[in-house]
Image: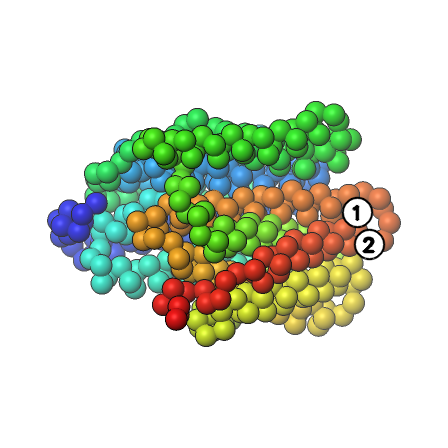
Amino acid sequence: MTASASRALAVKLTERQKSLAYLTLMVALVLEIVDVTIVNTALPVIERDFGAAAAQAQWVAAGYSLAFALLLMLGGRLGDAFGYNRLFIGGVSGFTFASLLCGLSGTPDQLIAARVLQGGAGAMMAPQVMALIQVLFEPLERVAKLAWVGVIGGLSAICGPIIGGVLIHANPFDLGWRSVFLINVPVGVAAVIVAWRLLPATRSPSARGVDGGGTLLFAASMAALLYPLVRGHDLGWQPWHIALLLAAPVLLALAWRRTCRRAEAGAPALFSPELFRQRQFPLGLAIALAFGAATGGFLFVFAFGAQKLLGFSPLETGLLHIPFSAGVMLGIAFLGRKLVTSHGKWVLVGGIVLMALFAGGTLAWIETAVSFWWAVPCLALAGTGMGMTSGPLTPVILARVDRSHAGAASGLIKTVQELGMALGIAVVGTAFFAGAATGDPGAVFPAIAAIEGLMLICLVLALRLPAPLFPEQDT
């Protein structure tokens, strides 16, 4: 979209209308991000009410992240082709309907299916937020608006478990855990009405279509990897589970080969292979994947273990996230982004080490039930480590990416982060439930081992990042 086209669209709305439209976009952003983590607090209650298996509880969490990750880049391309406002309204409508289905689910399988639908709808609406901000505001106005996107997005992610705990404790209309999903319905309906009235109808003039085959291959490779990791232990590791695991890298290689060929031919592709020709981008993506898996697994096991092993209520578990959330904000706002330009990769290394040490310490507290005051500093320091790493990681990954590929690269980063979350819930969650199934003390220690292994991978990769990280610092 040209600057003149964007400017022409922006002046059609009054300042009040633009503010309302922006607020609507932020509401959708909060809905999408909160629903990644809000369910963690509710899972033990859902498991108890349904009598669900551990693997089904994992899929309630992982199904959303997996569907969101696999369809995110497709959602961006569809917005370019068919209109950002149309995809946004359709995505919010689908998300609202899926939230209603979640709240009305009568079986674990129905809830899992509704969560997958919810994640898919979220992937349709999320990419349109940035695109519509480009349309609604002039370049200088966007600076403040995009800054608020980062702040609101970060707060939404870390407040999800807290909101979930408060809702379950308050138990509005005697809905129990269902209120975690049904609260989205009136908010989503209001967002659709305002978006339909105020969001400008526009799409990219250079839209090139989508690669449906590549999307299917990529989705199949991830499903082949994650399904046996989640259900293998529960179902006794059948031969076809092993076959799926072996098929996953083959399908991923086919998806990569197809993407390269289509890019060379000038046809629509999932992403540009050129992004991987300089070392910092693929290294950063690998860190984002492993770090997302470690943090996603940690938050899942922490929320689940605090209730199942220590007997905390959903509200108490939600409130336990406050010191972690405070640490994350400290790490992002005051440490990570400010120090990375002067200290480079060592900021990431420090954050990874902090997260590894004190996430493990927090889960060890769940197992040993030592003083509550042991948990508070562990959570705060683990959160600080997470913020120090996650805050500067995206700018580091994008530092040497050509601006013409910035949009595709940003979408790829978000996809990898969400895949990491789903992978972490699968791997770390399975390790936790395998330990708990034995009935012996030490249920969380397999999960701690899995998290520490993922953090070790992050550390090795971070140490391999080049110095300096930013091209402006090249001599």
Element under disc 2: loop
Residue 457 occupies which quadrant of the picture?
bottom right
- Is 59 on the left-hand or right-hand side of 415? right
Report which residue position mark 1 lands on.
435
Specify the amino acid type for callout 1: Gly
Q: Report if residue 133 is visible in the image.
A: yes
The residue labelled by disc 2 is 442
Tell me the CA gap for discs 2 and 1.
7 Å
Which residue is pictured at 60% across the width and 32% down the height?
248
Q: Position of residue 237 (x, y in %)?
A: 76, 31
Image quadrant occupied by the N terminus: top left
Q: Is residue 94 above or below residue 20?
A: above
The percent position of residue 376, horizontal first and vertical second, equals 66, 70
Horizontal and vertical percent position of residue 309: 76, 54
**Image quadrant occupied by the C terminus:** bottom left
Residue 372 or residue 329, whichever sits in front? 329
Give whichever of 177, 212 is nearer the camera.
Answer: 212
